[in-house]
Amino acid sequence: MPRPARVSPDRILAAAAVEFAARGFGGARVDRIARRARVNKAMLYYHFKSKQGLYRALLRRTFSLAAARFQAIAASDAPPAEKVDRVIAGLAALIHDQEFFPAIMMREVAEGGAHLDRETLLTLAAVPRAVGGLVQQGIAEGAFRDVNPLFAYLSMLAPIVFYLAAGPIRKEFGALHLEHLEPLPVDDFVQHMQETMRRALARTS
Amino acid sequence: MPRPARVSPDRILAAAAVEFAARGFGGARVDRIARRARVNKAMLYYHFKSKQGLYRALLRRTFSLAAARFQAIAASDAPPAEKVDRVIAGLAALIHDQEFFPAIMMREVAEGGAHLDRETLLTLAAVPRAVGGLVQQGIAEGAFRDVNPLFAYLSMLAPIVFYLAAGPIRKEFGALHLEHLEPLPVDDFVQHMQETMRRALARTS
DNA sequence: GTCTATACTTCGATAGAC
DNA sequence: GTCTATCGAAGTATAGAC
């Protein structure tokens, strides 16, 4: 039983992540994805059956991995405030396994779910659900003040996603000497957002 | 002197905003823009000289209008905390004149400044500069605690942009009965973010 | 499962008359 | 400034041999 060796689909998905993140659905080129994955185009169409099929498969994998992380945090028995800390740090850490998650998420929000089917939409929705649920529970336990859980979700995740996705354009700005662009380390921003959310959710006004 | 009547370029830009916001640079079709603007393609290429030229012109107009708003707020003599309130409300209000600002901004961040020249990049950079400067001043005056101004910029703008750009996909979720998707009014979210930033920037920990 | 070759379509851009 | 017609390039997808 040497190995089933399904290396192709994974390599294709990895290449697709790079391409779709950088250029969006409409700007992505199937040829480029195939070349980067070192398979020929026919192989790509054999595994996924269209550009759209590949896109959906990529989004399902990307968002289900992210949702799994948040669900695990939500299911843990840490106190609510610590769960929020972990969600913020976990999102930033996601970039290690899923380098292109932020850009893909930004694009898909702007895309408005075009190109997606019901199943894929359901996968995407698992992310706000996990985080919103966690906040809701914190409110029910009296650990947080009474805020809309979806609002809290947006205020903690959007800045991190934005920050991570903005890496390339920040580099462009830097090349133009536009910002006093100190390295702006990720960890500092994570801490900033953790402190921000701690304050935002604190019961004692 | 009846009128200079430069109706075409404006109509083209308006149509381009719809198309680029919905599909991104690579997914946008020049024919669709021309049709929507009710001009023929040759006219479009006469005014702007390529798809890229049109895209740049659109971004310059879009971001310079946004930056102007924030610069006006920064230059006013309101106390720093109120300026932050106004920036948040102003961003949400932007959508009235610039319906597609959020989606375009999200896409361009993900795009990493590809397709842009130096001048256009400079225009985009005016937005973080205006807001960052306003926060910096608040810190200098002792009204805010000592935070990185760029971090503060991200934490106040990203959630609003995300929220506004997510309108279409939220609608998709709603169609699947995924969220207990109450209307989620914009004004409530604006107030939420104002309160969040008030807490995030308060000196007295 | 993997490859080469190619069919078919659409796109960005322009020529040239008015 | 405005239009019609069209070119050449590039794109997605597939047929069919191995």
Image (tube, coloured by chain):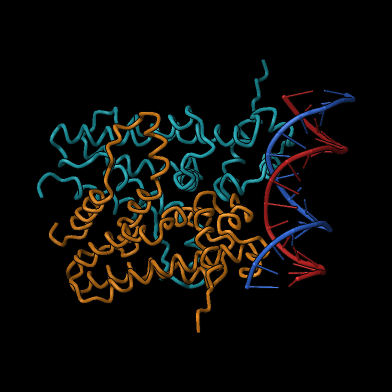
Chain colours: A orange, B cyan, C blue, D red
Outermost residue to the left: B204
Residue in view at x 35 percent, y 34 percent: B70
The answer to whether residue A103 is left or right of residue A113 is left
Residue B83: image quadrant is top left
The answer to whether residue B205 is left or right of residue A169 is left
Residue in view at x 24 percent, y 51 percent: A187
Residue B26 picture location, percent across and down: 60, 46
Residue B173 picture location, percent across and down: 48, 67
Instruction: Name the foreground residue: A183 vs B7.
Output: A183
Residue A24 picture location, percent across and down: 54, 52
Residue in view at x 43 percent, y 34 percent: B124
- Establish if A60 lies above or below B160: below
- Establish if A179 lies above or below A167: above
Instruction: Name the foreground residue: C9 vs A158.
Output: C9
Residue A98: image quadrant is bottom left
Tally of numbered discs: 0
The answer to whether residue C5 is left or right of residue B178 is right
Residue A39: image quadrant is bottom right
The answer to whether residue A184 is left or right of residue A202 is right
Outermost residue to the bottom: A1
**Quadrant (top left/top right/bottom left/bottom right) for the C terminus of chain A:** bottom left
Residue in view at x 52 percent, y 63 percent: A11
- Establish if B176 lies above or below B54: below
Residue A87 picture location, percent across and down: 28, 63
